[in-house]
Amino acid sequence: MIPANIDRQLLKVQKPARYCGGEMGSVQKDREKTDLRFAFCFPDLYEVGMSHLGMKILYSLINAQEGMWCERVFAPDTDFETILRREKIPLYGLESFDPIRDFDVVGFTLQYEMCYTTVLNMLDLAGIPVRAADRGEEWPLIIGGGPCACNPEPMADFFDLFQLGEGEELMLDFLALVRQAKREGLSRRELLRRAAQIPGIYVPSLYDVAYREDGTVAAVTPREGAPAKVQKRIVKDISAMYFPENFVVPFTEAVHDRAMVEVLRGCIRGCRFCQAGYIYRPFREKDPEVLDGQARTLCTATGYEEVSLTSLSTSDHSRLEPLMEEMLPWTQQRKVNIALPSLRVDNFSPRLLELVQKVRRSGLTFAPEAGSQRLRDAINKNVTEEEVLATARTAFEGGCTSMKLYFMMGLPTETMEDMDAMLDLAQKVVDLFDSLPNRPKGRGVQVTISVACFVPKPHTPFQFEPQDTLEQFREKQKHLLETVRSKKIRVNYHDAATSRVEAILARGDRRLAPVVEAVWRAGGNLEGWDEHFSPQRWEDALSAAGLSGDFYACRRRDYGEVLPWDHLDYGLTKAFLIREDKKAWESVTTENCREKCAGCGANHLLGGACFEAHSGVL
Amino acid sequence: MRLIRVFFEKRDRAKYISHLDLTRCMTRAFARTDIPAWFTEGFNPHVYMTFALPIPLGFEGLRESFDFKLSEDGYPLERVRDQLNAALPPDIRVLEAAAAVRKPEAITWADYRITLWDPAGGEALAADWDRLLAKPAIPVEKKTKHKIQEMDLRPLVTQLGRRVEAESLTLDLRLPGGGAMNLNPNLLLGALWADRGREAEYVQVVRTAILTGDLAPFA
């Protein structure tokens, strides 16, 4: 039952279904028979969080444990937040409506930097003090994970611990300790000391950070037996790994509302700007038989009409063709659509192309990322102009009349000629369309180029590189708009100010914690949404703290500098990242991992070579 | 092919599901069962399903219904009920699946139980309500897709019961329902708020029955 005090409010807000749970697949347990309550918080709106596979996996995993109850918590939209505060309703779990401040563990997934202020707002809505140092024994443990945990330093003051890497095994190790600590009545301090001994757990309060006069990190020193380096956890055999048999199926539509199976982890490509391509290494594939079974089970349990084969680059699965052969008959019979996001066009067999065309119906998108071949070589994005044009030709001949091209501006080594090359490429696509005798009649072609601002990220070869200043970004955007000659080419770009704050936080250190807190106190919340983002709040908070945004965003790091995340080991050696950055400046590409091992170091997490063919070589 | 009418209740958490979301929820529920439902044959095949009288978001319903077609005539109807119940969230329960008797156009009335809470108390609410009902006419503006229409609600309202408690007032009302003439209780409540100068603090609306012109339950 919805408690009356909450029920009274729900008709006053937009989309009340976001705040009352009760969906098919949501888990109810008996409070009397649970000894561990976990609040899984996604610091964004329901429809965003409910699209996230990682949350579904950990929700099911924890609920599969006897005596543990995991509930979902999302950020309320501003209309409901106002009501929660006015009516003094503390933030609650969607399954039980119980206040999460009474739970044992409150976990946040940190998917992107712009959610940081939302995390603080959710803690505050729950009635939990935001700073770890202000929380005594009576408060839940506040933990974090997800990609931003690879440099959580700007959030270090707010969390008790972070889980680095993959959670399928680590989460259970951690929860076993929490249970033991409750049973033995351990103090929070002692629990954290022991947690720091679990591989993959980073307890920031057990590390002292010293700074140099120039603001860079002098040293990070562990205390109380914590390891000098915390290595992220991975699951070696992802085919044998836990995977949910059911999802919570939302009533109200989520951004991605469909079944999902994860076909592979990691990425063989090594695009030098792409954090996901590095922090999820080593590359591991799931067996097609396992995937087919998991997809069937999920579709049966959820009733979804679409199943997505997700990963960073699904066509890099070496047995995608047999998987598709296996899945096509039953999906067609059950009228289930197969979605294939993240496809590369350069590695398709004719048969695979045929299979994919049977299921594909979405628009045509391409991510060359850079306009010129020289710059694509520098960022190691191994897509050629010929490939873009060949695919466009096939699509146009098949009746398609639009194409979307994704680019980035501000990439290391970029010049104005590279910017011009973006438009040249778009123009070539337009010219190609117009030159085709069998092009679709009656409609012109529309090429959209979408240009994002480059954000240098930790654990990538470009972690040493400066971001463009706001002025540089705006000058380039202006140049781009001024040089578009054709109405058939549409240019989209993002506001550079968001990318700048992302860059500051992504490579930030602990001195930014007061800044994040000040921005939140000044009203920062849900800043991933343009209407809630204010760059001025960030600039004000930085100046008040005596810090410079340029120091974090626009400064080149010396290869010898101690970086704030150097004590967090994602399997990659710094020597490898330096090597790759140097190759970028020589416009030299690196083979993909399947062709040749580049020696990044991540194979040590596996304890052997990533690919059988390389096992003798290493 | 048999036209089957499924009667269900929609309570508690499920009352915040919109009609569109309820339709999608039912579609997915069918996909979780092996009920041989007939699919439309268009470009985008889906289970054929029609809801006789969609229920507004925020209302509970004690006996709502939708129709679908069984492509195997002999498929047992208890099995339709049980399979759907296993495939639906706990706050949507199928009460019965039966061969459709009347056409949806036969729906004429809907009964509602409306409970109002207000710090002013049940007596004050009842006085406000009685004053509204005693008026010779309750004129309101009803917005349709194309125009704003003036209408008088008073002749459309039949009060079946009225209970006053310390903090609340509970009304049992019969209102026109169906394709020809439909009165959403929210329109009536809007007139009450306008007349007393403010909204009640909390309102619960339950659709208790759907009736045909001869006041028989829609079957």
Image: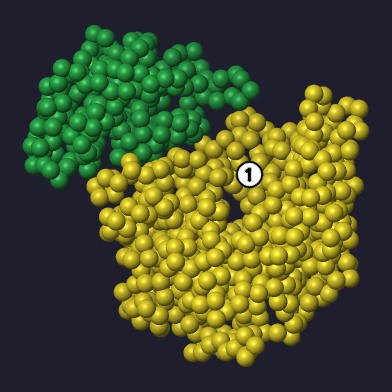
Chain colours: A yellow, B green
> Which of the 4 quarters of the picture holds residue A296?
top right
- Chain for mark 1? A
Q: Is residue A392 left or right of residue A518?
A: right
The quadrant in which the C terminus of chain A is found is: bottom right
Tell me which amino acid carries mark 1. Ser
Indicate whether A386 appears above or below B80.
below
Identify the residue at horizontal 41%, vertical 25% (top origin). Answer: B80
- The residue under label 1 is A308
- Which residue extends farthest top? B214
The quadrant in which the N terminus of chain A is found is: top left
> Which of the 4 quarters of the picture holds residue A370?
bottom right
Identify the residue at horizontal 38%, vertical 65% (top origin). Answer: A124
Which of the pair A229/A235 is nearer the observer? A229
Which of the pair A535/A76 is nearer the observer? A535
Which of the pair A145/A533 is nearer the observer? A533
Identify the residue at horizontal 78%, vertical 41% (top origin). Answer: A489
> Which of the 4 quarters of the picture holds residue A328?
top right
Mark 1 Cα-neighbour bin, 10 Å: few <14, some 14–19, many ≥20: some
Q: Position of residue A400 (x, y in %)?
A: 77, 32
Q: Position of residue B207 (x, y in %)?
A: 27, 27
